[in-house]
Amino acid sequence: MTEATPNVDMEKLVSLCRRRGFVFPSSEIYGGLSSSWDYGPLGVELKRNIKEAWWRAVVRERDDMVGLDTSILMHPRVWAASGHLERMSDSLVECKNCHLRWRADEVKGETCPSCDGELTESRQFNVMFKTFMGPVEEDASVVYLRPETAQGIFVNFQNVVNTARKRLPFGIAQMGKSFRNEITTGNFIFRSREFEQMEIEFFVKPGTDGEWFRYWVEERLKWYVDLGIRKENLRLRPHGQEELAHYASMCSDVEYLFPMGWAELEGIANRGDYDLRQHTAISGKSLEYYDDATREHFIPYVIEPSAGVDRSALAFLADAYTEEPDKDEVRVLLRFHPDIAPLKVAVLPLSRKENLAAYARDVYADLRREWRVEFDDTQSIGRRYRRQDEIGTPFCVTVDFQSLEDNRATIRERDTMNQIRVPISELKSTLSAKLGGEDLFVLPPGGEIWKVEKED
Ligand code: GAP
């Protein structure tokens, strides 16, 4: 069996993201801030689409899940209870020569990976960001930026049980920013100090946790595949005992073949009753569940699928990246699943002449009521198509002078470059069916095959 190779190298992807407005270095005009990134006009749409697809799959389409949005700053005792204060630390070594710092587990040999200098003994470094609440910087006012969104869910467990009318098994989902003062960052948006997570805490009766763990592993893998990630670029990697987080009895990573190699995209852990039990002990408030069927009180177990929004964005970008020979050139396209694509449709009038431009603007105004649509009347039609290909827009609608007479427009599909001509009155329903995954070039009623136009 040949070893799988990444779909695209990182440099190409970073350059496309920068050039087209997906991701910019943070504070660029000041020289950038190490490993901090800003999402541009297309990046923000991509991220929103990822989060929306996740929320739809794990909350809206299920009756055993509810959502939550808790604050980033929490009572400091939360982190004592969860074990993060004591244990969320990495082993750090420093080079005595160039003073670069490394995570001890990332250094393969005995010396500095950068200059071969001698390394210090390793010491523990807590990765939680510390700050102060209120105007006085004193120990009593220390708070932390949350390193995971999960704890906001655990401390609200009883609030949700009391208000949401959910019985076990049920889950709580939350997405939001988390912060970790990582020793080493890098690989673009793969590892940064400020990132977004999408986390589920799924509460189950003890004894059924093994079964639910397997269920969620499959469910989460399927989510990526349903949204177009190729199966061969995904794999599961169960954790060995020695690498399990302090709260987990079992964990499997969903790994993706990123441009720099296989790495964690999402972790699915069995946290048992660790967190609810700890919070009960430290807060003195009971987080037990009462099962009215069996009349038992117990602390539920929890299965936690925890994904990163930024890592998902990187995986969707890398997986979609495609280069195709195009005459003497190379056509670059992002084959995004329509749900993920930042723009769904682009409206391109063939000319800027007044009557055609006005007609095209009407078409645009109507379509953008449904989707994120772009209107573009600059440059040649060929270059406009190339731009839409490169940002992954599934469909372009071209309006030409004939449209003024026959009230029809051309839909051009990104992946095949096939074109069909449909009545304007059926444009929305046709696009809607195609964006919903209907076989792309089955003709709509009244549609006719349009000869493939020369794209230059
Ligand atoms: N609540 C469990 C938890 O936080 P984790 O494996 O440490 O588990 C879950 O993080 C996910 O969050 C990871 O799979 C990854 O997608 C994302 N993530 C973690 N640290 C990150 C970082 N420094 N930069 C970007 N994403 C990160």
Image: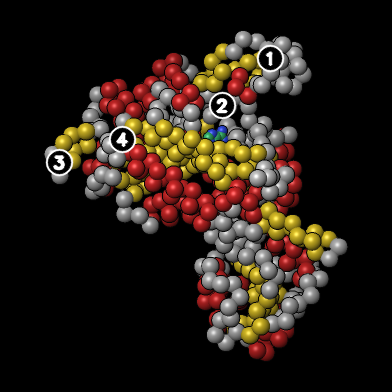
Give left or right: position of 264 versus 161.
right
Q: Which mark is residue 234?
A: none
Q: Amino acid at mark 1?
A: Glu
Q: Mark 3 sits on what residue?
A: 294
Q: Secondary structure at mark 1?
A: loop
Instruction: Give the image location of residue 345, x and y in percent.
Output: 61, 67
Q: Amino acid at mark 4?
A: Tyr
Q: Which mark is residue 181?
A: 2
Q: Mark 1 sits on what residue?
A: 110
Marks 2 and 3, the one that precedes in the sequence: 2
Q: Secondary structure at mark 2?
A: loop
Instruction: Give the image location of residue 31, x and y in percent.
Output: 73, 34
Q: Mark 4 sits on what residue?
A: 301
User: How many other residues sit within 10 Å of disc 4, few (<14), some (14-19) or many (≥20)?
Assistant: many
Instruction: Give the image location of residue 450, x and y in percent.
Output: 69, 82
Quadrant of the rendering where the N terminus is positioned: top right
Q: Amino acid at mark 3?
A: Thr
For the question of whether residue 72 can be seen, the reply is no
In the rendered image, the vertical position of residue 21 relative to residue 331, given as above or below: above
User: How many other residues sit within 10 Å of disc 2, few (<14), some (14-19) or many (≥20)?
Assistant: some
Marks 4 and 2, the one that precedes in the sequence: 2
Q: What separation in Å lies between label 2 and label 3 (alpha carbons)? A: 45 Å
Q: What separation in Å lies between label 1 and label 3 (alpha carbons)? A: 58 Å
Location of residue 117 by image quarter: top right
